[in-house]
Image (cartoon, rainbow, N blue to C red):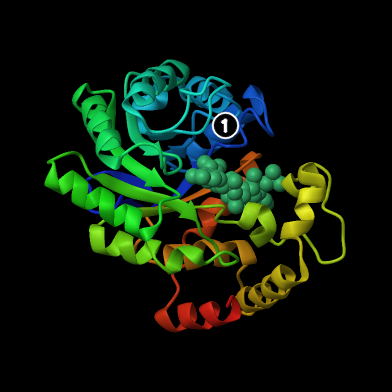
Amino acid sequence: MEVRRLGDSGLKVSETGLGCNNFGMRIGQDAAQIVVDAAIEAGITLFDTADMYGQGQSETMLGKALGARRQSVVVATKFGQPMGDAAHRQGASRRWIMQAVDESLARLGTDYIDLYQIHFPDPATPIDETLRALEDVVKAGKVRYIGNSNFTGWMIADADWTARDQRLTRFVSAQNGYSLLDRKAEQEVLPACTRFGLGFLPYFPLASGLLTGKYKRGEPPAQDTRMAAWGERAARALNDQNFDKVEALSAYAEARGRTLLDLAFAWLLGHPQVSSVIAGATRAEQIGGNVKASTWRLTSQEMTEIDALAA
Ligand code: NAP
């Protein structure tokens, strides 16, 4: 497994990571253990979770599954989404960050978080307050690096300038939705990552499984898949426009002896800002496919051809 730097930082992460939002939502502790074991066996070192996934269950399950191996991996989690009904248990205020970090540490069963990410921008808290609170949790040794998620380009710029101006710890990563079927991040966020030296962690990299090729036009999703679990909501993703692209991209990959899954990973990793593809997985076999997929290196001409097919 190849590793990449997370932006300009010294933190290195495996090119294929593991997104853990299925833990506590789609799968239980036993299945999570199998997935984490398979990931570590395959050389994955980046595990991405959040406090709100399963209202703490994902962090708890990840911590248990890692056990004594925690020191040899990179644990990324997030804060800011509502944790219960109390109004103050969300957002990016100093008050909540100080409490949220301790709660995440307890659930993860660790005394440090490698990458602590603000899950969504908090318009009700000045970025100075958030960065100063994050500086304090870094100084306290509870957190090693900080990142943002779902920020726009100007928010990334604003946070970077604020941190530099006030000599605070800077964000080293940005996490936003990005895949061959969702390219909004190209407008502002990827250029901002380049300019400010942030590593980019695309979420929904497989468009929730659509880019694995397992969903077919006109056929209901197979049992035990995310789209089957989504019910009505799946119709939004399983639309003709997406299937037109999926079919064209599958044909392109197959003509080169590869799969759509390989293409989805290779295209993301073809962007220099991308540090790791944190795909979710519910089974050990998926880990094998995702790790193998990260080995295909596309030429710049292939990147251009694929861009056109997915436009
Ligand atoms: P994804 O990676 O696009 O899709 C993952 C799903 O695709 C899996 O649950 C599995 O679905 C299927 N899959 C994965 N590998 C497969 C393979 N090799 N063959 C067949 N199917 C495969 O979406 P995601 O997991 O939601 O997103 C990745 C991570 O990003 C999350 O886990 C989370 O850590 C993070 N995330 C962050 C945010 C944010 O706001 N920052 C938002 C969403 C997600 P089945 O259930 O069908 O097995």
Give above or below for 84 relative to 249.
above
Which residue sits at x=83%, y=50%? 222
Residue at the extreme front of the image, as rendered? 124
Q: Is residue 214 visible?
A: no
Please provide percent x and percent y for residue 51: 49, 28
* Residue assigned mark 1: 53
| 246 relative to 132 in the view: left or right | right
Which residue sits at x=55%, y=56%? 205
SS label for mark 1: loop
Q: Is mark 1 within 8 Å of ligand 1?
A: yes
| 27 relative to 82 in the view: left or right | right
Please provide percent x and percent y for residue 56: 54, 23
Q: Is residue 97 visible?
A: yes
Give above or below for 195 relative to 149.
below
Which quadrant, please, contains the C terminus?
A: bottom right
| 203 relative to 98 in the view: left or right | right
Please provide percent x and percent y for residue 29: 63, 23
